[in-house]
Amino acid sequence: MKELCFDAVVIGGGAAGMAAALELEAAGRSAAVVEREDSLGGILGQCVHSGFGLIEFDEELTGPEFAERFEERMRGRPISALCGCTVLSIEAEGAEKVVTCASPAKGVSRLRAKAVVLAMGCRERNRGNIRIPGTRPAGVYTAGLAQRLVNIEGYVPGREIVVIGSGDIGLIMARRMSWIGCKVHAVVEILPYPSGLTRNIVQCLNDFGIPLYLSHLTTNIFGRRRVEGIEATPIENGGLVPEKAFRIPCDTVLLAVGLVPENELSREAGVSLNPMTNGPWVDSYLMTSVPGVFACGNVLHVHDLADYVVEESRRAGRFAAAWLGGARPERELRVKAGSNVRYVAPSRVEPGRDNKLYLRTMIVKNDAVLEVKLDGKVLRSTKRNHVQPSEMISISLGMTELEFAGPDAVVEISIL
Amino acid sequence: MPETFDVAIVGAGVCGANIARKLTSYRLDVALLEKEADVSFGVSKANSGIVHGGFHHAPKHLKARLEIQGAAMFDRLKAELGFPFVRCGIVVAALHEDEMRAVEQLYAQGIANGAIGIEMCSAERMRELEPKLSRDALGGLYAPGGGIVEPYRFVFSLVESAVKNGLRLFTGWEVESAARQGESWSIRSVDGRELRARFAVNCAGLFADRVSRAFGAEDFEIRGRKGEYYLLDRLTRAKPTRVIFPVPTSVSKGTLVVPTVEGTVLIGPTANEAEDKEDAATTREELDAVLRSARTMVPDISEADVITSFAGIRPTLGEDFYIDSSARAPALVQVAGIQSPGLTASPAIGEYVKDLLKRSGLVLVEKPEWDPYIERTPRAKELSPYELDELVTGDSAYGDIVCRCERVTEAEIVAAIRRGHTTLDGIKYFTRAQMGRCQGGFCTYKILKTLMRETGMGWNEITKRGEGSALLKGEL
């Protein structure tokens, strides 16, 4: 069994992994990126639509183009990209981490490192997770699998489509399926508001005349061998109205019912997870509960945009490099998700420097107020024109505001 | 002249597979006919996967005897065939005082049946045996010999063994009619194929009534009883160490909590008359009921752990199994109404049917070259990194992890395909790829590609489970 040594091993070669590895290398650290697919880029490779890069590159790119920019930066850099290589386990051996991985070309290898950056991304929730009853025919796909089949493999998974859930991949796939000549009959969403970005509702549904059924639960899937239809039941005043249930015939169901950070490896490595995000708890250095193990991108919490992913991942790479050089946060304050806030990542801030925080609200509201409190005292109150759960909020905090906070002070962020 | 066999077995479920394997240990030409695209695709694929403890049925029943005999045969079968099977033990939990009386009856029944090692348990003993059990359990029964098995892997390995010893397997072969031609049966399929057999065995599960009529034999009706299940993620906090049964009712053994051999947790089944024997749809109400009853025994069970749901349909006929030589048609053995504990009893059913055939005049001469063992496919998930590394050196496909959730390599997918499992479900049952928490979200396209490469099938020939279940509808 081969053994290789690095300062840091980055797990996952998507946008997050590449962004983190580039920073580690720029800081003079030896780094390896382990990627299970045969090439870098992660899920971006199948996202052939545009809308990427507006923040990062100030221009609109497709997913593959966005990934290509990072691959370009990786080329010529002394970063070991181990592609076609699946991580089997992450274990601590003393102060070192051992990442065991398998590939067809090299068999099983052990990578020794002082730091590990988790950048495995997320996976789609599936039918079982939302417990749609009915038959189990062919033709039920997650939207991401359908996207792979269409955009990379070149197959049409079905002709008459219903999308369940209004997550972004589902909206984008509704448009994609329309473009290749399929009929998208409906998007069915359980919540009273869409789960995807507003721009995707407009560009992917409205522009194609695809009906969006909000406040509708998918209560059945029909068809013995291949999907023949679904049943949608309206929800009124918090309850199902079975007498208003209706059937939508289709041969294919695409599920866009949310994403979950993929943390099976982290969990086995002893990393503690935040039940609100299903991602690791991280401190102001984006370091998990296991010293030397960092997390960034969608494995930490699910982001709206790849641009946010790389922003956060660059910071993770820099923090990991600083940590390898012996830097530690001088002191940290706990950050708490307050009223109407689902989570804040990271959950620690270091006073005296700029801390970037991402948070997600639980409500839909116009003219909302974002409030930051320190030990119950309002530090800052900012107006937000519109907030909704599908749109992540980012704030900067801490340069001077937290200077005089006591050691046990708690920062609480609320949306009011 | 159509091909002629000594015995034709109709139905490649767990009974057909056991009978076929038994018969191929003799100098016989045996055919196994299955209407679905793969074996074990009927009743045998969707059930609780329990090797029962021998106390659920009264001694007067044939099923009670076959259950005890069959259960005892599993260790040897596992040694020969390597399917996943563990004797983890079974507990029956009494949650109310009056249920303790029912448990006493089960105990007495088990002793009368000859169940080995069963014991009556106090509340304290129950908790020691099963820490996940509800604090409400007042006591119960423990059957240490009970266990769990992966039913489809069991059937796959039995059929593989039989094929290795000369069985001819015909999948996609649905019996339409049968007629006597001299001293043998002429059996015709719905698509116009024909074969001959001197003896026939009807173990067609839910459709044994139809097959019986096709042979001009007894007229009976198999009714379907639907059972719905939830499967929970292997990371659930609710994983017990033993199979937990409630106290049974007159119609069913109740909703169980099963720690599967592969580390997931199965809860179910319900028991409802199925109007339509082919309708395996699940319903919200029944699945909610599954959760509720399972939680009375294991309170830690959470719907957040659900990875999938499914329904199985059991073939019910009378109170007991119907296994006998037909009184109306010559040289035909009927194996019908094999509901629970059919899986447990199935190895004994193989022996029993062999004896019935012998009594009807089938000459059994043992085959000295009969090989009870089959080739094992190493499974990446069960190997240490060193062992896996060694395998990759010999076959690089062992280094390609196709299914990340269940850690299945491409080599295992190829092994499944080369054994004839060429549908997505067949590959799933053989390898477990698509069976984990992502339910195929990541690996389906990889399996599609491997399947096309290995078999030369076109995209339009790939199905989930045979005809009518095409996966793809076009090419760009």
Image (spheres, rainbow, N blue to C red):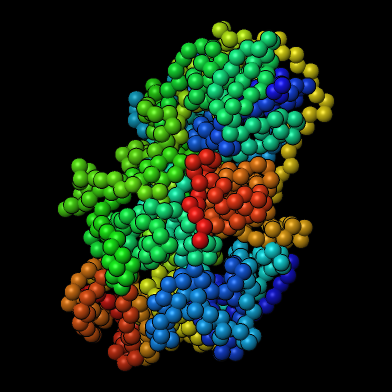
Residue at image point 75% right, 31% down: B165
Q: How many marks?
A: 0
Q: Is residue B60 above or below residue B238?
A: above
Closest to the observer: B106 or A47? A47
Q: Can you give x and y, in whole percent of width and height, for residue A319 in the image?
A: 49, 84
Q: Quadrant of the N terminus of chain A?
A: bottom right
Q: Is residue B326 above or below residue B28?
A: above
Can residue B365 be seen in the rendering of this structure? yes
Residue at image point 64% right, 31% down: B170
Closest to the observer: B118 or A130? A130
In the current view of this chain or complex, which residue is farthest to the top? B327
In the current view of this chain or complex, which residue is farthest to the right? B368
Residue at image point 36% right, 80% down: A357
Q: Is residue A231 above or below residue A320?
A: above
Q: Is residue B109 left or right of residue A252?
A: right
Q: Can you give x and y, in whole percent of width and height, for residue A257 in the image?
A: 37, 59
Closest to the observer: B359 or A177? A177
Q: Can you give x and y, in whole percent of width and height, for residue A156 in the image?
A: 48, 57
Q: Is residue B276 left or right of residue A288?
A: left
Residue at image point 44% right, 80% down: A61
Q: Is residue A45 left or right of residue A372?
A: right
Can residue B14 be seen in the rendering of this structure? no
Q: Can you give x and y, in whole percent of width and height, for residue A333 in the image?
A: 36, 80
Q: Quadrant of the C terminus of chain A?
A: bottom left
